[in-house]
Image (cartoon, helix red, strand yellow):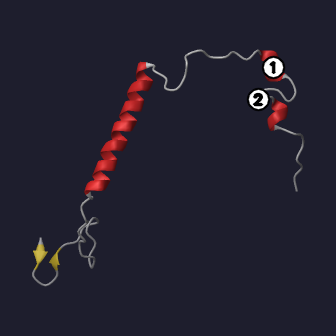
Amino acid sequence: MSDSLTGPKATAVDPPGRPKVSRAPFSFTAQLFAVIAAGLIGGYVYLGMAGIELGTSGDKDVVPPTVRTSPGGYRSFAFWHSGYEGGK
């Protein structure tokens, strides 16, 4: 429904008084980077689903629980928390 004086009715997508602005197409470089990024992410997802780990020998070290809980030891609570920090 259009009126010869007001033109076509505006919708929420096409508000009145704002002309449509055409977008520039993506450059070849941007498209190439997008394809490369998609390939890398897809390859990483495939390797993760297949259970293949990159850069590891396959042997994992086991840290005994006594080392973990000792003061100042590997990932101990005392390493992250040095005591009461106070407040206001």
Nearer to the camera, 19 or 58: 58
3D distance between C-alphas at marks 1 and 2: 9 Å
Q: Which residue is more in the foreground, 42 or 85?
A: 42
Amino acid beneath label 2: Arg
Q: Which mark is residue 75?
A: 2
Depth order, front residue of 4/26: 26
Looking at the rendered image, the quarter that the N terminus falls into is: bottom left
Relative image position of residue 83 (x, y in whole percent) = 89, 40
Where residue 81 sits, quadrant-wise, is top right
SS state under label 2:
loop
Which quadrant is the C terminus positioned in? Answer: bottom right
Residue at 27%, 79% (x, y): give it. Answer: 17
Characterize the local packing of mark 2: few (<14), some (14-19) or many (20 or more) Cα atoms within 10 angstroms. Answer: few
Q: What residue is drawn where x is 41% and y is 30%?
A: 45
Name the spot of residue 41 as percent of width and height, x first: 39, 37
Callout 1 touching callout 2 (CB < 8 Å): no
How many neighbours does mark 1 have within 10 angstroms: few (below 14), some (14-19), or many (20 or more)?
A: few
Above or below, 76 against 19 in this view is above
Tally of numbered discs: 2
Q: Residue visible at 27% across and 59% down?
A: 27
Placement of 85 over or under 60, stated as above or below: below
Residue under label 1: 67
User: Which is more N-terminal, label 2 or label 1?
Assistant: 1
Q: Position of residue 30 (x, y in %)?
A: 31, 54
Residue 38 lies left or right of residue 7; in this view the side is: right
Give the residue at x 82% y 22%: 69
Pick out the residue farthest to the bottom.
5
Which amino acid type is shown beneath numbered disc 1? Answer: Val
Disc 1 element: helix
Q: Quadrant of residue 3?
A: bottom left
Q: Is residue 83 above or below residue 30?
A: above
